[in-house]
Amino acid sequence: MKKQATSRQSVSADLYDQPGHLMRRAHQITVSMFHEEVGDFVSPKEFAILRMIHETPDVDQVRLARLIGIDTSSAALTAAKLEQRGLIARTVSRVDRRLLSLRLTTEGKKLLDDTVNGVYRMREKLLAPLTPSEQKVFMKLLQKFVHLHNDESRAPLWTQVDAAQSAKRQEKPLAKRLKKQRPTEVGP
């Protein structure tokens, strides 16, 4: 049973001292700066998808969602839009025919190359008001916060290690299926 808030905790709590409200505002500021530095032709989520596909060619949509911390339906919808724009190609996975593998097209690679400098400018601009030591502390605390609360998310983030272990588990059943499909040799 949840503890009931006192009247002092409920209505009179200062909105600007609430972590959730401040994080929502920080997100708004970050997205605004992203569009200012990068442009409106790609969203932060689309950039994250393109970047992860670049780093992990032939990643499937489910694994991609887990690697960047978005839900699988959002990953699928965004991937379909990126494919329509000619930025990625989706093909049936060689590992599991139920999945779609993703790869950047030439246009996708060019867009990624054209936007990456804007992303780094945005990072510098976001952190510029802080001293170098404050920047390090801020980033460490932000990473710690995200790591400690990862399992609370509707779309928990996978690490590269998690993804690699999952890929190995997928490859083993495929190898067994392929072995079973090979015709047996008949001796003389």
Image: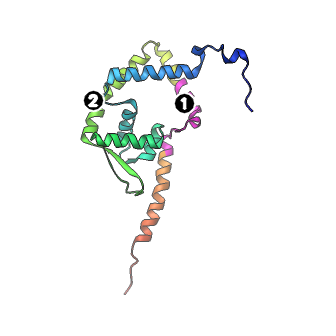
Secondary structure found at label 1: helix
Q: How is the image coloured?
A: rainbow
Q: Residue at x 67, y 18 (%)?
A: 10
The dominant secondary structure in magenta is: helix
Image quadrant containing the N terminus: top right
User: Is residue 71 positioned above or below 130 on the image?
Assistant: below
Label 2 vs 1, first from the N-terminus: 2
Q: Residue at x 33, y 31 (%)?
A: 42
Residue 151 within the segment the image draws in magenta: yes
Residue 79 within the segment the image draws in magenta: no
Q: Residue at x 32, y 40 (%)?
A: 82
Q: Which residue is mark 1?
A: 146
In this view of the protein, which residue sits in the foreground, 117 or 186? 117
User: Is residue 141 positioned above or below 161 on the image?
Assistant: above
Q: CA distance from mark 2 to mark 1?
A: 29 Å
Q: Magenta residues, as a range? A: 141-162
Q: Which mark is residue 114?
A: 2
User: Is residue 88 positioned above or below 182 on the image?
Assistant: above
Counting from the top left corner in percent of width and height, residue 30 is at 43, 22
Counting from the top left corner in percent of width and height, residue 100 is at 38, 51
